[in-house]
Image (cartoon, rainbow, N blue to C red):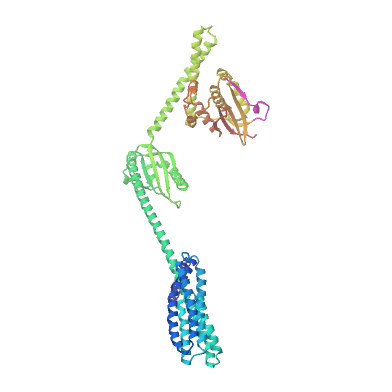
Amino acid sequence: MSQVAASDSVVRVSERGLSAGIRDRADPRLVLADRVDQLYGQMWLGIVATFAIGAIATFEFWSVGLRDLVLFWWGLVLLVTAATAGLLYAYRRSADRAEHADQWLRWLGIAALANGANWGFAGAVFFPSHTDEQQVFLAFLLTGMMSGGIPLYAASWPMFALYAAGIVAPFTYVLGTFGNRLFTEIALLVPIFYAVNVAVAYRLTQVFHAGYRLRHAYGKLTEDYSVLNQRLERQLGELEQARRQVEASGRKLSLFAERAPIAVLELDAQGIVTQVNPGAELLFGYAGAEIVGRQIKDRLVLPELRAEFDRQWAQLIESREPVSALKVRSPRRDGLQVVCEWTVTPLVNPEGTVIAVIAQGQDVTRQLEAERMKKEFTSTLSHELRTPLTSIIGSLQLINSGVLGDLTQDIGELTAVAERNGSRLLDLINDLLDIEKIESGKLTLAPEVFSLNDLVREALVLNRAFAERFKVRFEISSEIAGPPPEHKVHADRKRLLQVMTNLLSNGAKFSPDGGTVEIAVRERGRRVRVSVHDRGPGIPEAFRGRIFGRFAQADSTASRQKSGTGLGLAISKRLVEMMQGHIGFESREGGGTTFWFDLPRHDS
């Protein structure tokens, strides 16, 4: 029983708390305006009651011979009633009465006090001059008028207190000073009855006030619920549209996976296959039922590679980052092996949990074999061409040097052209061999500590003839023309000299006749930068993104007139990066281009 009582108490407290929370949403100004409107709405009842009861009192007192006093009292009644009616009329005609509700309430309080004082005056004047029966009638009349004010002014207990005080105060004074012990005792009881009536009016005012607050609060809640319902309807519509879009996207993805020419597998976070497409069945030779529900490594990973697969899978689930261009050799059902290039994408929910992993793979076995054969062919062809070509160039150089005798002008020009073109062809073969070694990982470096300033000076000496051929001049900036400090680096001297030769030859080829190619060495924090500045036409905007690619040459008239394989910058970029450096370029103010590379400074 105690538990039931406690639960009922909790329920009542919760209900009271809920009601209080709802009432707190009401606007106090609107509640006051409603209370004032109710008080003014009941004023006509007070006016009608005043005339009706006043007529009965007049009939009772008219025969006594106090007609002049009765007429005077009626004058007061008509004056107060007219003022009250005017106040009611003004209130009804007012357009902004809700905004000035407090002012209308004060005026009504004055009218209530005047109306009560009018009846109190009647009691004080008529009570001493009448018989006992008429005195009882008058006391009953005044008591009824005071009690009748409770429902009339229930919306504002201070107004009832003023109205009742106007009646009680004069009448109590007359009773107390009449000289009769009984009347004196009644005079003592009247204030007590007055206090009880005011207390009742106070309680009724609280009830009315709470009712108005609840009405407005529920009205506001209704508006809020209407807005909320409209918003909810919009959100439901948006959710329905989103659901349809998701379903459409799901159908598209399903159709894509089903008809895609590549293998598509869906796995869970443990590496168990949950779905495969026909492309995967065709690639590996397994039916979908033979793969779904099994660990992917049991079917599609060679036994000797499973430990590495577990390590990479754990890293994928932990990082939740997609992996692309992942090449894996996998067994087929028929026992053959294929090399697949995979793109693996974890699908992560907002909580960060991997809900699925999508793997897309394609067979690149033939592509890799073709690339291997191409590299082997290029390497073999280059080696086979380089030996006889070196002999041809050496023979042409001997002929052009006059060892075999003087040549006629026509023959000399032909042999010189043959020597230059043979050198160009040898450069191309050497570049092809270098790029092949770099990409296959067969190129090894021999790093050492040396002065970058000395290497720059050596490169200028070795390429001076090349600059004279294009009628340009190499110029060292004043920063490295003087004595030390020297800038030392730890790199492969021979390969870095190759990089310098490529940059200097480019600067010379694309500089105008009589121009100057400037070379500078500067420290940039913990790195040393070498810059080669030319005054050429610059690099076209559309070509800048692929300038370090293989066989890259700007498609312009000026560049096509210059010799070159298009491999120099590609080789330079790879060599510099192998030495932990960076290479780049930037346009110069006034025209031309600056190519640069920087390497870590070596502090001995």
Residue at point 39% right, 57% down?
Answer: 230
In this image, 256 relative to 162: left or right?
A: left
In this image, 529 relative to 26: left or right?
A: right
* Residue furthest right in the image: 483
Based on the picture, tell me whether residue 397 belongs to the magenta stretch.
no
Indicate the position of residue 422 as horizontal and vertical percent values: 48, 17
511 and 340: which one is in front? 511
From this view, report whether residue 304 is shown above or below residue 374.
Answer: below
Task: Report how many numbered discs are placed on residues in the image.
Answer: 0
Give the quadrant of the C terminus. Answer: top right
Q: Which residues are magenta?
A: 472-486
Indicate the position of residue 43 as horizontal and vertical percent values: 45, 74
Indicate the position of residue 88 as horizontal and vertical percent values: 46, 71
Indicate the position of residue 145 as horizontal and vertical percent values: 46, 82
512 and 482: which one is in front? 512
Give the quadrant of the N terminus. Answer: bottom left
